[in-house]
Structure formats: structure tokens, C-alpha cells
Image: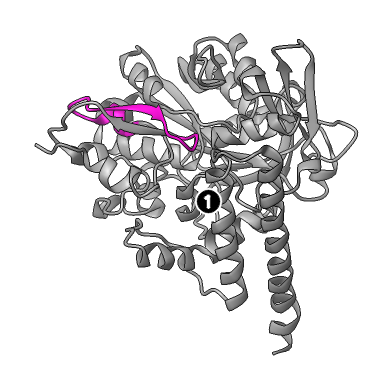
Amino acid sequence: MRSTPLVIDVIVNNDLCVGCGICVVQCPSQALRMDWNNLGFLVPVQIGNCDNERDCIDVCPFNPEPKVDVRTEDEISDRFLTQATIKSDKIGTYINLYAGYSLEHRSTSSSGGLATYVSKQLLRQGIVDFVVAVRECNDPHAHYEYGVIKAEDEVVAFSKTRYYPVTLAKAIQKVKELDGYVAVSGIPCFIKALRLAQYKDLTLKAKVLFTIGIVCGGLKSKLYTDFLAASLNVDKLKVISPQYRIKDFNSRASDYSFGFVNADTGNYEMIKMSLLGDMWGTGLFKANACDFCDDVTAELADISLGDAWIEPYDVDGAGTNVIITRTPLADQLINRGIEEGDLIIDRISESIVVQTQRGSFNHRHNGLGFRIDLARRNGIVIPPKRKLNETSFFFKLVQRQRIKLRKESLELFVAPISFSSYVKHINSRRKRLRFITRVYHFYNNRIKKFL
């Protein structure tokens, strides 16, 4: 018997945890529970001794020594998405690719409302009895949590994008106790953890009938929300019901706002995200584990949904989804929606899907090998990865700067310095990153081609 579960030794202590909580569910000794760390992420903490730590770490999406037959997303996909007809080294296996929106749910949902539409159809058609997705909660230490949807009219309350840490731990434990079939929505690493659990746990394999994957640009700390509130001169404790993707129907889809109810005044506070600079390409407030993920499009889900960040779709402020169907059932849901006039959909190519997430692919795939080398030099073991491309000298400089900026954005925010000092320092770092990035692009687009 170990005094400390391996998942804490190898994953949490090496900053590779994303807080999915599946290890907590699968721990045979119930030796783990989820809690907040000092940088605003949910992580498992030890509450007892573990009799078999392999059961905990085998379901971790960042397990450095996975079983041979489920080493990467490719092997896992071969086990769960057996009817997908096309294989892509960029977006995974799939059946069809689309871009479009739901006529009913577009205005009240993030992007084109396809996650809401699919969830409602799964319940309406009796395909599943429950949908597990993120909702608001009454926890004073968190704004959101995973909950279980039982009826169609509950789906809309779960329909918005939440850039806030959540865990599947309690929800998946409840799934095991539910009588009926379940659909689960989640970001790529959460879906991977769930698939690994299904591979080991026949109850979960039978009950979780459908998965909705959300294309992910990186998991944000709860400090991200605190930073946004501070940018409006509001204390984090006064923030009620934060909304991260408030649409401007008269602008571009990417021109969205952050907003919340101020508990002191009752007023709705809001700020355009464009005024705060690039919060995604810089890696601000992002989990370290995200730098070691090569799954951009939730390759292991039945259906993957993201934002169509590309013209002509991006010019429409109402939002448009990019849609990847990976199972016949997922494809049937989309085509039925088209036939019944509920969905406005275009068929698109793989190259368009890749362009909608071009920056993420560039960072996740092209810089991954270099980041892994750096981690290994520091004694950190990284799981097997598929996308280990050659990296130029200038792109390595970009990666080094992003790593520093990501780390400092978290550590300095909880340091005893003023908010204005924090912003000044982070902006100087961002300025340096922009300069290095411009040098890299100049080399890549001009000098490299000339040579």
C-alpha cells in the first residue's frame, strides 16, 4: 500500500493535471477528492491511502505510461469510433465536416447553438435519458459545475461557454447510479479521460452512449475570471453569473464581451474582450498541461463542435459552429436537422476546419516537440504524443516566451503586488512576445521561402 497515490506523485506534482476528476471516481480506495490549488485550478488531493494506484492513473489523460493499446488518441479512437470512414492526422477520424447554426438556439447559445441543439435532440428522440454538461451553481467558491439534465427545457440553462475550471468527479459518480443512458459534454482532455474510464469500466462504457466534444483553446484558471473582474475595478467576490461570450450581433463573431452582475450595485458590468488584448494566443492563465496536448478538435467524441473562426462565417456576430461528426448517430442528428429545417448547414473541407483553428494547430502541433524536450530536461515525463514536428530557431523563441508568460500570468496574480503593477508587467511580456512572433513570421514567410 502506498502512502501517496501515484496520480499525485506523477501528475499533480508535475503540474500536468487538468482537473477532470475521473481519477477520483475510479480510485478503488476513495483516497482522492477534488479541491482548488493556489493557482485557481481544481486538482485531486489525498484524503486516504490507495490500495491500487494504477486504477487512478490509468484514466488520467496525461498518464506518462499509458497501456500499450490506448497510448494515444489514435489507439483510443480505433476502439470507440470504429465506424468513422476518414482518418486525418490533424482532426482525427471522422465521417463528415460541416459549418452552420441552429435557427432556434443560435441567439441564446455560444457560437451557433449546435451543442444545445444536439443535447435537446438526444433527449427528445429518446436516444439518452440524461445529458451531463456545465451549469451555474451555488457553491461560494465556484461559479459553475457539471450537472445532469433530465428534460429538454433544462438544456438552455446549460447552453453557454464557461471559461472556468470544472470537474466531472461528482457528475460521473452520479452517472454510475443513474438508471438510463447518458450523453456527456466536455473538452478534449475530459473526453479522453472518460474514454479511458470506459475502456476499464464496463458500467460506464454501457451507460455513456454519446459524447459531445468542445474544441478547446486551453483550460483557464479561475484567476482568469478574477482578472476580468479586476479589469472593471470589481472585487472577485462581487461577481455573480459571469458570462464569457456575450455576442455583438452587429459585429464579428470574435468581437464578444465578458459580463456579470455586480453584487454590490446590482448593475450588469461588461467589457469588450478586444480591449484587454490577446488572452488566448498568449496562453494567459492557461493550465500547464495544455502545452502537452495535441488534440485540438476533441478527436475522441462522437461529435466535435467549435467556432468557425474564418470568413465568411466569422463576419456574422451571431456565431457559427464548425461541426465534425465521428459516428453515424452524430451524422444522422445533423442531417435530420437539415432535412427538418432546424439547421442552416454548409458542407466544408478538412482544410477549412484546420483554418478555423489555425493558431491552435500551430501551437499545439508545431511547438509540441520543443516543449516536451524542455520538460524532459527538467525531469518531467510526458505521455506519448503524435505531433512532434521540427521547430525553427525563431519559433523556439516564441515558445520560450509563451511558457514564461503563461507561468507568470498565474504566479504574479496571486503575489502581493498591486493590480496595476501586475498589468504593467504582463503587458511588457506580451509586447515582447508580439515582437518575437513578428520576427518568426517574417522569417517563416519571407526569409525561409527565399532560402
Between 232 and 284, the one lying in front of the other is 232
Helix, strand or loop under label 1: helix
Q: Which residue is found at the position 72% from the left and 71% from the top?
A: 441
| Residue at the spot of label 1 | 407
Q: Where does the image place residue 76, in percent across and percent down from the top left?
A: 36, 47
Q: Is residue 110 visible?
A: no
**In the image, what residue type sits under mark 1?**
Lys
Between 108 and 254, the one lying in front of the other is 254
Q: Is residue 398 above or below residue 211?
A: below
Q: Which residue is found at the position 68% from the left and 68% from the top?
A: 436
Rendering quarter of residue 233: top right
Rendering quarter of residue 251: top right
Please say whether residue 141 is one of the residues in the magenta stretch: no
Q: Where does the image place residue 181, in percent across and percent down from the top left?
A: 40, 19
The residue range painted magenta reads 22-41
Between 126 and 450, the one lying in front of the other is 450
Q: Residue furthest left?
A: 1
Q: Where does the image place residue 317, in percent across and percent down from the top left?
A: 83, 36
Q: Where does the image place residue 355, in percent across and percent down from the top left?
A: 69, 56
Q: Which residue is found at the position 40% from the left and 54% from the top?
A: 74
Q: Which residue is found at the position 51% from the left and 74% from the top?
A: 390
Q: Quadrant of the C terminus?
A: bottom right
